[in-house]
Amino acid sequence: MRRQFLKAAASAALVPAFARAIPSWAATRPSDVVVVLNSGDETITLIDQATRQPLQTFPVGKQPHHLMATPDNRLLIVANAVGNDLVFLNPVSGQPEGTRPGIEDPYQIGFSPDKKWFLTNCLRLNRVDIYSYAGGRALQLVKRMPLEALPSHMAFTADSQIVFVSLQQTNEVAAIHLPTQALLWTMKVGETPAGVWLTPKDETLLVALTGSNAVVAVDWRRRSIVRRIVTGEAAHNFRSLADGRHVLVSNRVSDTISILDMQALAKVADISGLRPGPDDMELSADRRWLWTTFRFDRGVGVIDMQTRKLVDVIGVGKSPHGIYFYDRAPFYDNLPPELQVHAPRAA
């Protein structure tokens, strides 16, 4: 009896106290939940995807910025950068299922396509931490790699050999060889690089320049910039349109989202009329609805991609950043479907 009690207590300790009362709707409408990280309020807001009404807001930890599903799509990881921990959510209902302390400064997170590596970009600590990954919550620190300065976003080659990391303060991109955890090179790309994106077949590396108004296309094998694509002020982050050809980039100061042609390396359209600070984006499985956080407006927008018009804004918390929902279009452009970390639910 004592062993059973201790086991139950240990299991309960893994789940934050705020999560132990599960609301009734979580069992009846799980597939409709949109998860939004409010970095400034240190909370999560859950939104009903169908009605676009907020369902619940709860505390999650200090400065949650980004989130990502595990490769098997059974857990959603929220990274608390200042809290130095990870919170695990049910990816369908959005309800917390446990924590992992002792993960220092996980500002940005990512899994390699081969599912062997889990990386954290430690923005304030100026380093990248590389963990081996054995499934579920099993992480083992392998190496801490100093990178000056302000490592921000990351992108993996399809063969999991290289990860590219943007360095905001030094205006560079770094290339890390994952099998040996060695720094291959760094190169200057432009003002305050943030989002990084690989086009199909790893042909070109796209880098969004938040300190400027453009995305640069990099021939990463030759380490040369082949084109500068003007998008909008403070180009920041990417999201695939899941058509094999186009990618979106959010422009946080112009309050626009640009559509780029990855073959022509050119901008083909802008989505304008948005609220301040469009940032992270998520696309519905049917590619009809684009959701985006408005970092400077305490809101989440829904864009009709048929008309390219903002049709709804849902109030959330302060400085909304990461956004996720389970039923969505494939995320990456350089990975085949079987390697998509963010795999959509099977039909």
Image (cartoon, rainbow, N blue to C red):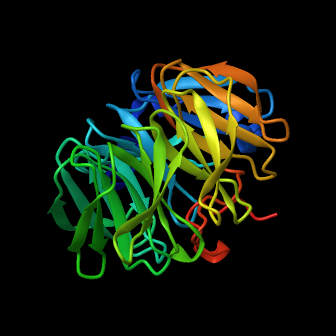
Position above or below: 136 against 50: below
**Which residue is drawn at the image coordinates 48% and 40% (left, top)?**
235
Position above or below: 80 against 276: below
Residue farthest toward the right in the current orientation of the protein: 306
**Which residue is drawn at the image coordinates 70% and 66% (left, top)?**
244
Which of these two is toward me, 95 or 330? 330
- Looking at the image, how many numbered discs can be counted on the residues? 0
The answer to whether one can see residue 24 in this image is no
Which of these two is toward me, 285 or 276? 276
Residue farthest toward the front in the current orientation of the protein: 227
Q: Position of residue 188 (x, y in %)?
A: 27, 57
Query: Which of the image's four quarters has the C terminus?
Result: bottom right
**Which residue is drawn at the image coordinates 57% and 70% (left, top)?**
334
Position above or below: 265 against 97: below
Q: Is residue 205 left or right of residue 153?
A: right
Q: Position of residue 172 (x, y in %)?
A: 27, 55
Q: Position of residue 302 (x, y in %)?
A: 72, 31
Q: Is residue 83 left or right of residue 327?
A: left
Q: Which quarter of the picture shows residue 219?
A: bottom left
Q: Which quarter of the picture shows residue 14?
A: top left
The answer to whether one can see residue 170 in this image is yes
**Which residue is drawn at the image coordinates 61% and 65% (left, top)?**
333
Q: Position of residue 144 (x, y in %)?
A: 17, 62
